[in-house]
Image: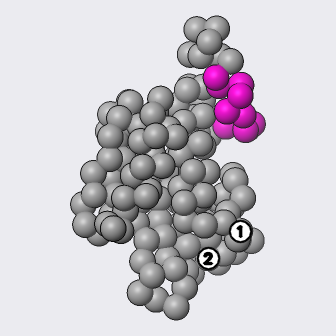
């Protein structure tokens, strides 16, 4: 079984309204989204602690990046969830993740990130104004009512 196949299946089936396709690049999984941006998912189990990063590259769309990772970068050690930290909009804008990841599997961390990204895309919120978490139920309702 390929390293990223189960993650690709999650992205393509559970988030088919947001994800166009995925590509296994060997060292990471690239997830292509409906707005021509992409999300790179990487993890390694070669260390004592599993390291991961999920990076939503939007610089060519609106000049932003969104990223979560658990690389122990000393610049972010004041974040209460260190080494886990979340880059919101810009590399320098770091905060605690907007969703819980403690004790979650990599599959569920990817799901949480994709939910967050989909909510940002479908609600047209600006990253610096994002203040509320919308439920999947709300998004589906808006779709049915043609508000998205």
Location of residue 84 in the rendering, given as x and y in whole percent from the top left corner:
62, 70
Name the residue located 53 percent from the left edge and 55 percent from the top edge.
110
Location of residue 51 in the rendering, given as x and y in whole percent from the top left corner:
49, 77
For the magenta stretch, what is the residue range? 130-140
Q: CA distance from mark 1 to mark 2?
A: 12 Å
Q: Is residue 148 rendered to the left or right of residue 104?
A: left
Query: Is residue 120 depicted above or below 104 in this figure?
Result: above
User: Picture quarter containing residue 25?
Assistant: bottom left
Query: Considering the numbered disc 1 on the image, is that residue within a helix, a strand or a loop?
Result: loop
Q: Is residue 14 magenta?
A: no
User: Residue 134: which disc?
Assistant: none
Query: Is residue 1 depicted above or below 61 in this figure?
Result: below
Q: Earlier in the sequence, mark 1 or mark 2?
A: 2
Name the residue located 46 percent from the left edge and 40 percent from the top edge.
13
The answer, for residue 63, to whether it is visible in the render is: no
For the residue pair 69 and 21, the one nearer the viewer reads as: 21
């Amino acid at each position: 079984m390929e390293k990223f196949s189960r993650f690709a299946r999650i992205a393509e089936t559970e988030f088919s309204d947001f994800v166009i396709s995925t590509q296994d690049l060997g060292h990471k999984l690239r997830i292509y989204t409906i707005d021509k941006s992409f999300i790179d998912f990487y993890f390694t189990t070669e260390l004592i602690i599993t390291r991961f990063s999920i990076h939503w590259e939007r610089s060519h769309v609106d000049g932003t990046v969104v990223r979560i990772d658990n690389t122990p970068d000393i610049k972010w050690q004041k974040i209460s969830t260190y080494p886990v930290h979340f880059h919101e909009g810009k590399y320098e804008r770091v905060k605690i993740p907007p969703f819980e990841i403690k004790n979650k599997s990599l599959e569920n961390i990817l799901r949480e990130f994709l939910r967050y990204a989909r909510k940002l895309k479908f609600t047209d919120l600006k990253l610096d104004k994002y203040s509320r978490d919308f439920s999947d139920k709300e998004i589906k309702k808006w779709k049915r009512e043609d508000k998205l």
